[in-house]
Amino acid sequence: MAAFTLAGCQPVPQPPSFQATDITGAAFARDFRLTDHNGQVRTLADFKGKVVAVFFGYLHCPDVCPTTLSDFAAALQQLGPLAERVQVIFVTVDPQRDTPDLLKQFVPAFNPGFLGMYADEETLKQLAHEYKVVYQKTSVKGADDYLVDHSAGTYIYDPQGYLRLLMPYGSSPDAIAQDLKTLLAPS
């Protein structure tokens, strides 16, 4: 009886505390089917066992995209060997200009393990709808001279493939690293 009583006095396990917005259980952004910059078709299942960060952007982006990729690269440096269990994916919302060759040059320049992904226009529209991502050409000066306004958050999945977090643009590498460590911790 005393053991039962003492067991009742144990603190109730608390859910993890995150810097990013916890969207665990969200009924969107469940999967993707995209081609990586090496020409390989990938789905979320290919990265089972890793924390996966998915960001939508474009290579001609003047600020948000390179900043986000730099912040994730810095966060992974903080993780040391744990970084091998994280996959960062950059999905282009500008398939007209962001060719596989350009993605292959640009995205891994931030970290050799980062993957650039692309799809045709129709697949991208469907994926953006599934992920609740918006994007639109703006400041159009010519056929290949424009900017793209786009959503700037990063979706983060746990090692079991469940969507857990929406990391807002401008999150520090420290905050990103802390949340990645929390998701990588044994449960």
Image (tube, helix red, strand yellow):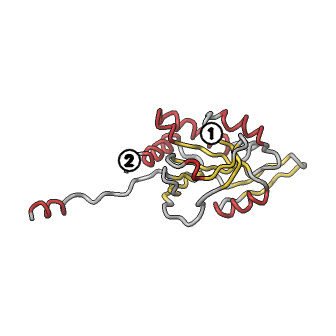
Q: Is the N terminus in the top left, top right, bottom left or bottom right quadrant? A: bottom left
**What residue is at 68 percent from the left and 38 percent from the top?**
107
Q: Position of residue 160 (x, y in %)?
A: 48, 53
Residue 134's place in the image compared with 184, above or below, is below
Q: Which residue is mark 2?
A: 186
In the drawing, does residue 136 fall left or right of residue 130?
Answer: right
Q: Are marks 1 and 2 in contact (CB under 8 Å)?
A: no
Instruction: Specify the amino acid type for callout 2.
Output: Pro
- In this rendering, the answer to whether 161 lies above or below 114 is below
Q: Secondary structure at mark 2?
A: loop
- What residue is shown with label 1? 114
Q: Could you tell whether 145 is left or right of 152 in the image?
A: right
Q: In the displayed structure, would residue 4 be above or below residue 59?
A: below
Q: Earlier in the sequence, mark 1 or mark 2?
A: 1
Q: Position of residue 73 (x, y in %)?
A: 57, 37
Disc 1 to disc 2, C-alpha distance: 24 Å
Above or below, 111 against 147 in this view is above
SS category of the residue bearing label 1: loop
Residue drawn 64% across the image and 56% down it: 32
Dot 1: few (<14), some (14–19), or many (≥20) neighbours within 10 Å?
many
Q: Amino acid at mark 1?
A: Phe
Q: Residue 111 lies in what quarter of the image? A: top right
Picture residue at 67% right of the left edge, 33% below the top: 109
Instruction: Residue 146: give x, y in percent of width and height.
Output: 83, 48
